[in-house]
Image: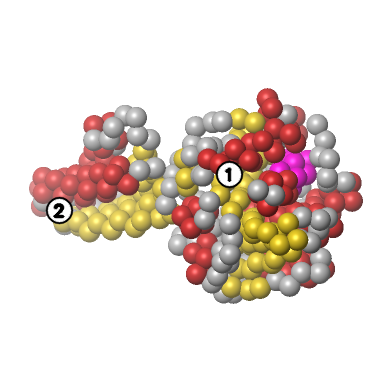
Amino acid sequence: MNSALVDSELENYMVKTRRYFHENPELSTRETETARRIEEELRSMGLNPIRIGRTNLYADIKGMYPGKTVAIRADIDALPVAEENTVEYISKNKGVMHACGHDSHITMVLGVGKLMTKYRDFKGTVRLLFQSSEELPPGGAKELINGGALKDVDFVIGQHVESRVPSGYAAVFYHEAMANADEFRVKIHGVGGHGSAPQEAVDAIIAATQFVSLAQTIISRKVDPYMPAVVTVGTLNAGYRYNIIAAHAEMTGTVRTFHKNVQDIIRKELEHILKGVCEATHTKYEFQYIEGYPALINHEEVSRVIEEVAQDVLGKDRVLHPNPSMGGEDFAYYLQEKPGAFYFLGVGNEKKGIISPQHSPTYNIDEDAMKYGTEILYRTAQKLLSR
């Protein structure tokens, strides 16, 4: 299994480029040097990148003949994670790390740019999108869309590296690919007091822990078992000292769904349970529900094209069809505007010790997989343009 298009020169370029971005990660909305370097790379290909906002940008590559326009998106931001890898290209920015593979996303789309500018014998236009802030809602996709980055675009495609999928494999989704990702915030107010005299206080921790427990019954008793959904309480902070009854408790959590009616049920039930618990425990509450990225729903016709290409590049038995991910992605906004699809590129490799999940301080990718991702994006764009 070898990439027919990515030669050793381009592969070496991509490894070097990916390691540069890995060494120099920047957080969401702050990707100034990342955007500058991407712009520099695009100009070296003879392209004229256009900025939208501070750190979003795109560039068009026009073929020799008129035709459709296909956009290919890469996200560019890193995470507030302190890297624990021992690689020579470890992050130079303390507490910031490309722990989700966006460094490779940038690199592979730049690789597509190298191929497209080298082989211009195609119809139409390929638009390379480099997007800020995927990791920080409301995300950068809407800023690009509002800035006109999808104007005249006929199809939009994207990919995400996935360590749970082996290198040399790809995962394709015909419809639902990634979940809606909401956040909720809860504050419970009681009356503080001495730990030895609970009858004189109103314990916020008692109310909070009951809410956490009962919130899990929403999935088991209020949601259709055939409808995927998740409710997770991620933080619970309360109390001052071991012998003081807590006057206040604060919680945050996430809700993951694919369907609006399920999202509405969970939102309503969370507050219904919270209200009941607080009435029963004589506490008061504040409840905030923040809608995040919508569910990422692929267009089947474009997913089928990605699948055909991936089978040609990797082999028919190396294209997987797993269950959708409950993770969130603001690529969903592009698919609300234009036909397109998003797939996962395998980058895990047990033999090389590359097994850590996304967002882990030891996350890494098998760089050999980048040539496959680059070729899949390139050839998918070519197929869509030739329609």
Residue lying at 52% horizontally and 61% vertically, measured from the top left = 141
- Residue sitting nearer the eye, 315 or 23: 315
Label at residue 194: none
Q: Residue 226, how many percent across, how many down?
A: 34, 30
Check the image and report above or below for 369 versus 102.
Answer: above
In the picture as drawn, the residue positioned furthest to the top comes out as 317
Label 2 element class: loop
Residue 368 forms part of the magenta stretch: yes
Residue lying at 51% horizontally and 44% vertically, measured from the top left = 298
Residue lying at 37% horizontally and 53% vertically, measured from the top left = 183
Q: Which residues are magenta?
A: 366-376
In the image, taking residue 229 as reference, residue 197 lies left or right, namely: left
Any part of residue 231 in sight:
yes
In the picture as drawn, the residue positioned furthest to the right comes out as 9
Residue lying at 81% horizontally and 58% vertically, measured from the top left = 120
Q: Which residue type carries mark 1?
A: Val
Q: Residue 60, how many percent across, how many down?
A: 70, 66
Residue at label 2?
283
Question: Mark 1 Cα within 10 Å, few/some/many (few <14, many 20+)?
Answer: many
Check the image and report above or below for 147 versus 357.
Answer: below
- Residue sitting nearer the eye, 202 or 194: 202
Q: Which residue type carries mark 2?
A: Thr
Residue at label 1?
302
Query: Dominant secondary structure of the magenta stretch?
Result: helix
Q: Nearer the viewer, mark 1 or mark 2?
A: 1
Image mark count: 2
Check the image and report above or below for 25 versus 311.
Answer: below
N-term-proximal mark, 1 vs 2:
2
Any part of residue 91 in sight:
no
Q: CA distance from mark 1 to mark 2?
A: 52 Å
